[in-house]
Amino acid sequence: MIDIYNRVPNVQDGTFTFICDPTQQDLMDSIVEAIKTVYDPEIPIDILTLGLIYSIELEISAVRVLMSLTSPMCPVAGELPLWVEQAVCAVNGVTECTAELTFDPPFSPALMSEEGQLLTGMY
């Protein structure tokens, strides 16, 4: 698995863990759970499992999410970052969130969680 930014694979269950200040781990866990409620409309899998979230930076109550899309031509390219921002801002303890798109590295099945690879048959 490719390590990107502060995302590391969780070998126990095939998901991802995001490294942060240990004093903010509960908030980070809540942010991750909120992001898991955002789905790619073309693929019925949440965008975290799909491997589209590269980094989650947490500074006190401000969050910056670095994410990608499955394709630069994604029909919801304008909406998906807004959905992430809305989901994260709904977390108690978060005052603001910015979701930024990147295509470096470009999406590939190798970036998906183990669970995502199994769900899509891309392993």
Image (cartoon, rainbow, N blue to C red):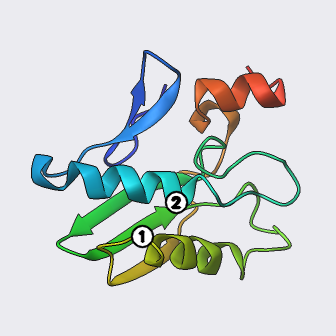
Element assignment for label 1: loop
Q: Amino acid at mark 2?
A: Ala
Q: Position of residue 23 (x, y in %)?
A: 11, 52
Q: Is residue 120 above or below residue 37?
A: above
Among the two numbered marks 1 and 2 on one chain, the one whose residue lies closer to the N terminus: 2
Is residue 93 in view from this perspective? yes
Which residue is painted at 65% across and 48% down in the image? 107
The residue where tag 2 is placed is 34
Position of 4 relative to 88 (above/below): above
Q: Nearer the viewer, residue 31 or 2?
A: 31
The image shows residue 119 at horizontal and vertical percentages of 78, 28
Badge 2 local density, few (<14 within 10 Å), some, or many (20+)?
A: some
Measured from the top left, where is residue 10 in percent x and y?
Answer: 41, 25
Q: Which residue is mark 1?
A: 91
Residue shown at 33% from the left, 76% from the top:
94
Label 1 environment density (alpha carbons within 10 Å; few <14, some 14–19, many ≥20) = some
The amino acid at mark 1 is Val
Asked if residue 104 can be seen in this view, the reply is no
Q: Nearer the viewer, residue 46 or 5?
A: 46
Left or right of 87 in this view: 22: left
Left or right relative to 122: residue 90 = left
Disc 1/disc 2 C-alpha distance (Å) = 7 Å
SS at mark 2 in the image:
helix
Report whether 44 appears left or right of 70.
Answer: right
Residue 53: x, y in percent?
52, 54
